[in-house]
Amino acid sequence: MAEKLREQQAIPVSKVQRAAKFISTGAKVGGNYVKHYAKKMVNPSMDKEELHSNNASDIYNSLSELKGSALKVAQMMSMDKNLLPRAYQDKFTMAQYSAPPLSYPLVVKTFQKHFGKTPEGIFESFTRSAINAASIGQVHQATKDGKKLAVKIQYPGVADSVSSDLKLVRPFALRLLNMNERELDHYMAEVEEKLLEETDYVLEIERSREISSECGHIPNLKFPIYYDEYSSDRIITMDWIDGKHLKEWLETNPSQKSKNQIGQALWDFYHHQVHNLKKVHADPHPGNFIVQEGDQLGIIDFGCVKVIPEDFYEGYFALIKKDLLIKEEELNQIFYNLEFISDKDTAEEQVYFKGVFKEMISLLGKPFHVDRFDFADDGFFERIFQLGDRISNDKMFKKSRQARGSRHGLYINRTYFGLYNLLNQLQAEVDTTKPEWLK
Amino acid sequence: MESATTKKTAKKDFRKLILEGYKNHVLEHGTAPKSVFKFAKDLKMKEEEFYAYFTSFDSIKSAVWIQIYEDTISQIESQEVFKEYSAREKFLSFLFTWIEELKKNRSFLLSIYGEGSKGMLSLPKEISDFKDKFKDFANEIILEGKETEEIATRPIISDRYDEAMWLQVWFVFKYWLDDRSPRFEKTDAAIEKSVNLAFDLMGKSALDSFLDFAKFIYQSK
C-alpha cells in the first residue's frame, strides 16, 4: 500500500499537475496584487508598472515550463501589444525564444516512428541538442549532401493537450486581457482552431509551399525549400536559412536604406497575401524572420495561416478608406457584419461603440491613408497604446456583456499589429501600397 | 556430447512453440488456457513434456516479459549514440524502446492486464523476474549517474533509487495500457516528463541543502 501511494505521487503529466502549476502562479499573482496595494498605501504615487512586471515574470515562468499551447497563448498575448501593458509585453516576447528542450532519445524515437531510421541514419550530421525552440516543437540543424537543413520536431502529445491547456489558460486570459467571459470564449474557439492547425505539420508544409511560390516574385524575399522525404506530420525538414534574427540584425546598426529595404519587403509580402491571396501568415513575431546577406528577408514557419473570408475582407478594409464617405446606413451595416454592434445593444451603447471603433480604425488605418509612412514615428504607436489602455479601462466596455468584433478580426488584427510593430522596431519608412479599390 | 546438442536445439524449439502457442491462445480466446493438460493437448504434446520447459502458465508470462526486456536491451545497445548518452538519456532511451517492444505484444498484454489494471495493487508475481533484471540495468545507470554526479548520493534513500526507477517503469506500463492517443504520443510525453522529474529529484537539489541545514540545526541544539 505504501508503494502504491508513492507511485501515485510520481504521476507528473496529469492535468492535475498542470493545473497545480497554474494555481501556484495564480497564488503568486494574487500575492503581487496584495503587495502592490500595500505599497500603494504607503506611496500613493506608485504606478501599476511594477505590479505588471511582477505578474508578468511569474506568469511567464509557469507558462514556459508548460510548453505547448500555453506557450503559444503567451506568444499571442505578447503580440497584441495594444491589449497588454508594457511590462507584460517584454516578458512575453521572451516566450518566443526559449522553452525547455526535448531529450535526444525522444528525438530518436520520433524519427524511428516516422522514418524507421535514426537521425544519424538519414542525415550526414545532426545536432544532438536543439538549436532553436519553436512554440510547439524544436529545431535541430542537419546536413545532407552538403546542404544545411533545419529539422523541426513537434513535442509529442501537443495536439491532444491544446484544448485542455486553453481551458487552463482561460482564467489568466480573463484577468490579463480584461475581457468578460463571453467575449473570451468567442475568441478562444478561433484560437483553438488555429492552434490545432498548427500541430498539423503536413498542412504547414502544404501552405508554406503555396504561399512561398505565390510570393516568389516579390523582391528581396527568401523562402526555404521543403523536403517531403524527410517530413511527416510531426517532423518538417527544410533548408536552413542562414542569417540573423531581426533583433540581432538591428544590433549591427544597419543603414536606414537597409532597414527600409527589409521593411518594404515585409510590407509587400503582407500586401500580396492579404489583398491577393486572401490567406495570410498570421504569426508576424520577430523569431519568424531572418535577415540574410544583402538585406534579403528569409521567412520561416507557416504554422499559423489565416484564411480571410471574402465578406469579412470587404467590410474590414472598407473601413480603412481615408474618408469614410459611406453613408451612415452603410456604415451601420458594416459594423453589424463585423459584429462590432448588435441588436442587443441599447441606442446609447450603439452610439458609443460606433464612436470608439471609428476612432480605432482611423488610427490603425493611418499608414493606409498616405503613400509613404514612417513607422519610426513612436508617437503613432503611443497613440495606439493609449487608445488600447483607455478602451480596456472604460466602464462601458467592462459593463458590456457582448463580444465585440468578428472572430476573424482576431488574427487579422494580430497580423497588422505584429506587422506595424516589426516595422516600428525596424524604424523603417515604406511605401504603403494598397489595392486599387481602396485608393 | 552430440546428443546433448541436438537435445538443446529441440528444447529451444519446444520452448518457442509453447510461448507462441500460449500467446496465440490468449489472443484468440481472450483468456488463458483452462489447464496445462488441455493446453499441452492442443499443442500435441504430453503434459509432462510441458513441465520440462515451464512449470506453470505464470512462468510463460514471465518468459514473455524477459523476452521483451532482452529485445529492448539489444535494440538500444545497437544504437551507436547510446554509449554517449548521460544516465538520464539512457533511462529515457530504455523506456522509449521498451514501449515500442511492448507495442508488438499490446493485444496480448491488454487481454491479460487490461481489465484489472486499475485494481493491480500488488505486482503480478510473473513480473518479478523482469523486475530483477531491470533492477540490474537500473543499478548500472545509477552507478554511472553517481560517477558523473548526475545523481546525488544520499544516505539510505540512494540505495532505493533502483526501486524508484522500477516504480516508474510500472507507472509507464499502466499509463500505456490506458493510453488512447494516436501513436501513444501521450505515453511518450509521460515518459519524458516523469523521467525528467525523477532525475531532477535524484540530482543534487534544494532538498540536500535543506537536509543539511536541518541536520545542522538539530545537532547544534
Image: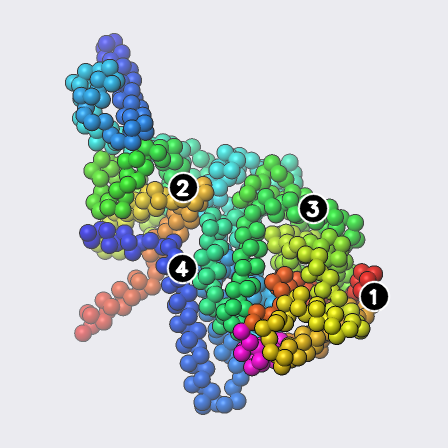
SS at mark 3 in the image:
helix
Q: CA gap, disc 2 to disc 3?
A: 36 Å
Q: Which residue is mark 1?
A: A439
The residue at the point 65 percent across, 38 percent down is A146
SS at mark 1 in the image:
loop
Contact, CB < 8 Å: mark 2 with mark 1?
no
Q: Which residue is mark 3?
A: A210
The disc labelled 4 sits on which kind of residue?
Answer: Arg
User: Which is nearer the eye, A137 or A19?
Assistant: A19
Q: Principal SS element in the magenta part?
A: helix
Q: CA gap, disc 2 to disc 1?
A: 60 Å
User: Which is nearer the eye, A388 or A265?
Assistant: A388
Residues beneath discs 4 and 2 located on the same chain: no
Q: Which mark is residue B96?
A: 2
Residue A256, percent across and down? 77, 66
Coloration mode:
rainbow
For disc 4, the chain is A
Q: CA gap, disc 1 to disc 3?
A: 28 Å
Residues beneath discs 4 and 1 located on the same chain: yes
The disc labelled 3 sits on which kind of residue?
Answer: Glu
The residue at the point 71 percent across, 48 percent down is A212
Closer to the eye: label 2 or 1:
1
SS at mark 4 in the image:
helix
Determine crowd level at label 3: few under 14, some 14-19, many 20+ residues with C-alpha closer than 10 A.
Answer: few
**Can I make out residue A42 in this image?**
yes
Residue A259, percent across and down? 75, 63
For disc 1, the chain is A
Contact, CB < 8 Å: mark 2 with mark 3?
no
Closer to the eye: label 4 or 2:
4
The disc labelled 2 sits on which kind of residue?
Answer: Phe
